[in-house]
Image (tube, rainbow, N blue to C red):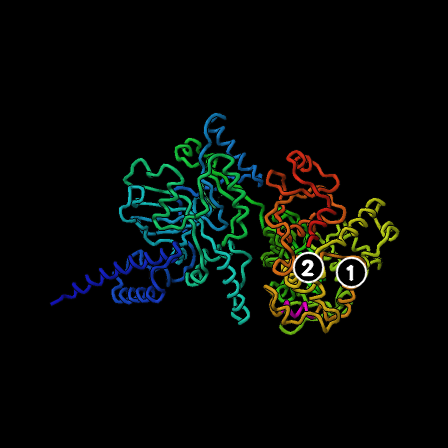
Amino acid sequence: MPSALDGIEKSATEVEELTRQLNHHAHCYYVLDAPELPDAEYDRLFQRLQALEAAHPELIRPDSPTRRVGAPALEAFEAVRHAVPMLSIRTETDTEASGAAAFDARIRRELGLSELDPPVPYVAEPKFDGLAMSLRYEHGVLVQAATRGDGEVGEDVTHNIRTIGQIPLRLRTPEGASAAQSVPPVLEVRGEVYMRRDDFEALNDRQRARMAAGTKGEKTFVNPRNAAAGAVRQLDPAIAAERPLSFYAYGVGEVSGPQAGGPVWATQWELLQALRDWGFPVSDLACVAMGAPELVAFHQRLAAARDTLPFDIDGAVYKVNRLDQQRSLGFVTREPRWAVAHKYPAQEQLTTVLAIEVQVGRTGKLTPVAKLAPVFVGGVTVTNATLHNEDEARRKDVRVGDTVVVRRAGDVIPEVVGVVPRVGDTAPDGTPWPPRGEPYTAPSHCPVCGSVALREEGEVDTRCTGGLFCGAQRKQAILHFAQRRAVEIDGLGDKLVEQLVDAHTVRTLPDLYRLGLVALAGLDRMADKSARNLLAAIEQSKHTTLARFLFGLGIRHVGEATAKDLAKHFGRLDAIMGATPEEAASVEQLLAVRDVGPVVAQSIHTFFQQPHNREVVEQLRACGITWPEGEGTADQSTPQLLAGMTVVLTGTLPTLSRDAAKDLLEAAGAKVSGSVSKKTSFVVAGSEAGSKLDKARELGIEVLDEAQLLARLAQP
Ligand code: IVH
């Protein structure tokens, strides 16, 4: 007869086995991103464990995955004294790549190395923008998680940290583990708790939905770091569990064990591998870097990758790899000498909103823009930041007088991320809070031309209905047409266009080609020489390509790539616009162009139906704008006369711009190269050609002028 004790023993074995399995699958799912079980099967095992634990609470193990959820809310956090203080690291103030070289130079000096000694090995890691955390494992089981606090004393946040699936509840001991991988009786793992950007966006979306549903107390977070900090310091673990956090391990605190001489790893790199083997996420970006040049290369690589990473970083961290060297370097006050944080320019800063203005875009879109007290962010001084549209401005509730977080990441236009809540009597800069302005509403009329502004059903944007009657739209249409990637009128910048439009000298694009010296010389800051240069640039822009011309017209939804596709597909402008509106390419015909969908096709069709647009195009052609017809139609008519050839352009050509010449050569199948070699097929030289021309002569390579090039391209 089986006794009750047998039953308990069986259950105990099953609880142990389920705990082990579930922890293994959590590691596969959260850390390795490679689940071995369908979710439903995981859930089934989990529920089985929950049921067993409910029946036999005495069997609940300290590393049970059921303990990740359901802990009761706390009154307050307990203080935790760190066995080994949590240090901070020195920040290199030079945010340029040279900062890495300065660190290496200091380390070499302090290690007493001469120029003849080999490079110092370092580990280079990302500097994760989250919160430092110390995770204490006793006999392999997570017993406590503590924040950094002041470095000596932090807060016990174990209940929240347990909810992070990436953090092992029990250290893994791989089969055949070596001594380095076996588990010390006490191990404190140090690392960063952070929130991924996608998790952050999803969290804010949920918070907004709740606000809309009228649930009290739901606010959005300004950035992933704040959201992570809020989640970690939540007294209610149920709320923390809803705010998905992630973790990267990068170091250790207290380590005790039979290895009396301390841990058996000899380098930071080996330590990272041991942490990975124990089941922690360790960044794949971390690497060994030999000496200053490799640190500099890491810094640059990481900076280039920064905006594409799924999480925020604020710099790189360099650590001397060898622990014996770390020990001999030691500490200065509270910072290790062997590590440095090499920051990137901050992408977010606080500033105040001085005004909210409305800008009119090229297509009439009205964009609310916050005018800001100047602030240095993302490497530049920012005074304007977009609020995108009316809904966004209201959602963020940005008003004059507010302190806001501005963000400038990469080359993206600066934006207002959110408003800093008014807590206490003074703003973060110490001054009393200024009065708040009114909530933003889109204007009913265009602030530039006074035309009615409309927001159509289902659209987020309010638009000026003035079209090219609107000075703002006209100015931008001209700048768009004149830009380098369109017909390229070198020297026609916004200040000039501003004056030309305001003085009514230029109303439409063709007016540009009717400008004379007299009109130009009368303008502000326009010397005779610049006027002549501008006229020459205007003249030069007459020789262009169909793709550039189409792009320059500023047809809605027609960017550079679409313009190229159109030119290639149709070959001739007449095939697109027809002799009359009725003969213009139909939506169906336009849909046959690669990558052109219904919205784009409709927009192009509508554009060429408008008599005033057709008039502009006709006049431009009458002013002498030309391009080689049939250009770019590789699949139709451009003969690949230069297929397989490598051509070098040098000097200034009399009519073609550098880009236009390049386009022509490429359309004919040539590769355009920047330097002359034996492989160069021929060189096209204009005035003031320098060393490339000499080199071509030296190598006996054929040299053509523009006319000869055009003649060669025109061959049947
Ligand atoms: S090592 C003794 N490595 O930066 C060295 N820190 O001021 C201890 N951090 O509080 C830190 N990424 O929160 C280290 N890969 C990394 C890091 C990192 C982010 C944070 C950490 C620490 C602060 C250093």
**Residue identified by numbered label 2:** 630
The circle on residue 621 is 1
- Ligand 1 within 8 Å of disc 1? The answer is no
The label nearer to you, 2 versus 1, is 2
| Residue 549, horizontal then vertical, whole percent | 71, 58
Q: Amino acid at mark 1?
A: Arg
Q: CA distance from mark 2 to mark 1?
A: 16 Å
Q: Amino acid at mark 2?
A: Gly
The stretch of residues the image draws in magenta is 599-605
The quarter of the picture where residue 266 lies is: top left
Which residue occupies the extreme front position in the image? 716
Instruction: Please name whichever residue, 398 or 113, is drawn nearer the observer in this view of the structure.
Output: 113
| Residue 375, horizontal then vertical, whole percent | 65, 49
Residue 586 in the image: above or below residue 65:
below
The N terminus: image quadrant: bottom left
Which residue is painted at 36% across and 56% down in the image? Answer: 28
| Residue 365, horizontal then vertical, whole percent | 69, 64
Examine the rendering and report whether any part of residue 426 can be seen.
Answer: no
Instruction: Please name whichever residue, 420 or 235, is drawn nearer the observer in this view of the structure.
Output: 420
Q: Main secondary structure of the magenta part?
A: helix
